[in-house]
Amino acid sequence: MTTTSFRLDEELSPKLEEIAKSLNRSKSWIINDALRLYLAREETKQRMLKETEEAIADIEAGRLVSGEEVMQWLETWGTGS
């Protein structure tokens, strides 16, 4: 585990202390948990942005399927064709 220092906003310090005590966890554990959740959320947002950009590129390049084609394909489900 590495050590990193940072400046904690003054209004967060008492809240952090209170939550840590109520959960019987260290402040470090709370900060790590919060950072883990934040990073996962940001990774998801970045992945969604990339997928959106790829979808837009597909549309602009004409790589798409019409709703009618999708419905025709769905009607073949379970028919063996």
Image: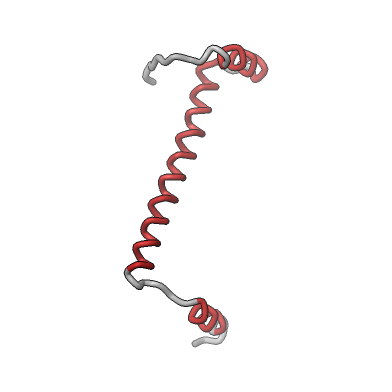
Q: Quadrant of residue 61?
A: bottom left
Q: Position of residue 77 (x, y in %)?
A: 55, 81
Q: Tell me which residue sits at (40%, 14%) in the image.
A: 5
- 67 or 29: nearer the viewer: 67
Which residue, as the protein is rendered here, is positioned at the far right?
22
Q: Position of residue 30 (x, y in %)?
A: 55, 22
Q: Tell me which residue sits at (48%, 28%) in the image.
A: 35
- 81 or 37: nearer the viewer: 37
Count the labels in the image: 0
Q: Is 57 rendered above or below residue 49?
A: below
- 1 or 74: nearer the viewer: 74
Q: Position of residue 51 (x, y in %)?
A: 40, 55
- Colour scheme of the picture: secondary structure
Q: Left or right? Give the position of 59 relative to 77.
A: left
Q: Is 41 rendered above or below residue 81?
A: above
Q: Is 51 rendered above or below residue 2?
A: below
Which residue, as the protein is rendered here, is positioned at the far front?
60
Q: Tell me which residue sits at (54%, 16%) in the image.
A: 27
Q: Quadrant of the N terminus?
A: top left
Q: Position of residue 63 (x, y in %)?
A: 36, 72
